[in-house]
Image (spheres, helix red, strand yellow):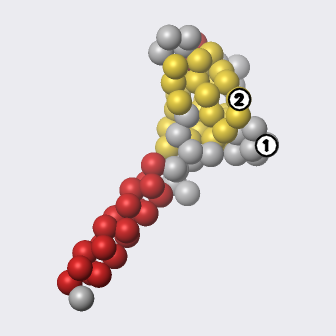
Amino acid sequence: MMKKMVVAAAVLTSLLAVTGCSSNQAIKTTDGRTIITSGKPQVDSDTGLVSYENAQTGKTEQINRDQITNMSELNN
């Protein structure tokens, strides 16, 4: 019984951790646009590009880091 409770607690903790990492972000650009992403954008420090999944289209897109003024997490 104790082993089942430990396993259940571990599964619940894992699910909460995954849910916390997948919150949407708002990217504000230098030209005044706001892009809503599905999940957290990935920054490539070698190229300066930020890759993200556009929440409206579902497509993976990229934007140059220099074109971003702010990135913030949204309360889903």
Residue plotted at (45% across, 49% down): 21
**Residue 48 in the image: x percent, y percent?**
55, 13
Which of 33 and 14 lies nearest the eye of the viewer? 14
- Relative vertical location of residue 40 with respect to residue 21 in this rendering, above or below: above
Q: As drawn, is 30 to the left or to the right of 58?
A: left
| Residue drawn where x is 62% and y is 45% of the image | 38
Quarter occupied by the C terminus: bottom right
The residue indicated by pointer 1 is 57
Q: Residues within 10 Å of mark 2 (few under 14, many from 20)?
A: some
Secondary structure at numbered mark 1: loop
**Disc ID at residue 61:** 2
Q: Name the residue at 49% across, 43% down.
A: 73
Q: CA distance from mark 2 to mark 1?
A: 10 Å
Single out the residue that lies furthest toward the bottom. Answer: 1
Q: Within 10 Å of the Cα at label 1, are there few (<14), some (14-19), or many (20+) other Cα atoms?
A: few
Residue type of the residue flagged with mark 1: Thr
Q: Are marks 2 and 1 in contact (CB under 8 Å)?
A: yes
Instruction: Tell me which corner region of the image, top left, top right, bottom left or bottom right, holds residue 68.
Output: top right
Mark 2: which secondary structure?
strand
Q: Is residue 13 above or below residue 52?
A: below
Which amino acid lies under the numbered mark 2 shown in the image of this protein? Glu
